[in-house]
């Protein structure tokens, strides 16, 4: 990372309060010509407008870094320390080293970089507002991917927050392994009824994709093509089979070509042995 004079990074997070999923932080450095007229605190705008502003922000010549800390780490080191860790990760993921940090809230970070904590900074500082929007949209995408894998929880509706609807579902199904076990009321629910569901190799594979940063577009564990996700511009179809079958693979490739006009497509054939992923072969279509 190179050092540049007078580079200021705005930092904010999303996901401190939910019962489910990671906390996500973002650090943003603007260039001199950045248009900030539409930027405001992510909590004060609608989902559709937030996503439009997000696309506008990331399409500009800006430097931004994302930091993600899992629910397991949150349960281990507590949400405050996990949030600080996510913020430090976001700074480390910037292309350039900022000279000063403007951090939303009242907490400082364990770093030698000059910093200032600003209460309600997401309403006052454009860089922090932009970081707030990127962090929020980035976390929502993660939760929406989990929603495909755990449709019974309606995660896309409440984003993992402790709404009455979410708590009612928790009482019905119990928590998943992605819920925060140290947060009430998850802490008070001892049932582990989702263990069998999560033991399915297709579910485990989908969860691994999400944790590795991929966006799940489709999931159905009852289907052979159980997962569709995005990977570096490719739409990826995941076929799960026990034995290699070139006829099935060739037929599926032709079927995808016929129904999907997207130019960048890939078929991942995942061979399963005793319920575990044995090997993966990829075919660009």
Image (spheres, rainbow, N blue to C red):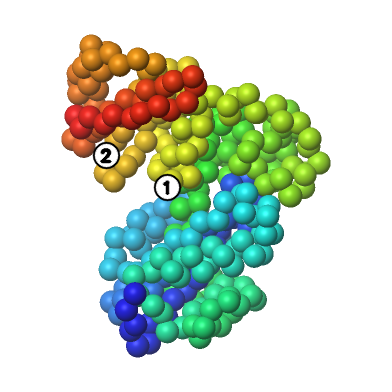
**Nearer-N-terminus badge (2/1):** 1
Where residue 118 is drawn, which disc sits there? Answer: none
Classed neighbour count for the residue bearing mark 1: other residues with Cα under 10 Å, few (<14), some (14–19), many (≥20): few
Q: Is residue 42 visible?
A: no
Residue 150: percent from left, percent from top? 56, 31
Total marks drawn? 2
Give SS at disc 1: loop
In the picture, measured across the screen, residue 211 lies left or right of residue 23, that is left
Give SS at disc 2: strand
Residue 278: percent from left, percent from top? 40, 27
Where residue 234 is drawn, which disc sits there? Answer: 2
Residue identified by numbered label 1? 213
Q: Quadrant of residue 227?
A: top left
In the picture, measured across the screen, residue 49 lies left or right of residue 176, that is left
Residue at screen point 50% across, 37% down: 207
Residue at screen point 39% across, 58% down: 54
Q: Residue furthest right?
A: 188
């Amino acid at each position: 990372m190179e050092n540049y004079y007078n580079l200021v990074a705005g930092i904010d997070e999303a996901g401190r309060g939910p019962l489910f999923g990671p906390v996500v932080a973002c650090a943003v450095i603007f260039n001199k010509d950045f248009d900030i007229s539409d930027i405001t605190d992510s909590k004060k705008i609608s989902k559709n407008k937030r996503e439009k502003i997000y696309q506008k922000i990331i399409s500009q010549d800006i430097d931004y870094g994302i930091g993600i800390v899992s629910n397991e780490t949150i349960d281990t080191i507590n949400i405050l320390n996990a949030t600080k860790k996510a913020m430090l990760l976001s700074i480390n993921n910037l292309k350039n080293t900022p000279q000063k940090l403007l951090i939303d809230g009242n907490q400082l970070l364990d770093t030698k970089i000059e910093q200032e904590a600003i209460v309600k900074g997401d309403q006052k500082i454009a860089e922090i507002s932009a970081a707030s929007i990127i962090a929020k949209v980035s976390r929502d995408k993660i939760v929406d991917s989990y929603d495909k894998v755990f449709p019974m929880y309606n995660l896309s509706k409440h984003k993992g927050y402790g709404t009455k609807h979410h708590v009612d579902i928790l009482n019905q199904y119990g928590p998943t392994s992605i819920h925060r076990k140290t947060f009430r009321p998850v802490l008070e629910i001892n049932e582990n009824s989702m263990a069998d569901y999560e033991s399915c190799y297709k579910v485990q594979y989908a969860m691994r994709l999400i944790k590795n940063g991929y966006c799940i577009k489709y999931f159905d564990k009852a289907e052979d093509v159980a997962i569709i996700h995005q990977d570096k511009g490719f739409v990826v179809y995941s076929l799960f089979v026990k034995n290699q079958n070139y006829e099935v693979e060739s037929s599926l490739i032709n079927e995808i070509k016929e129904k999907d006009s997207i130019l960048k497509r890939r078929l991942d054939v995942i061979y399963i042995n005793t319920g575990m992923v044995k090997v993966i072969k990829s075919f660009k279509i």
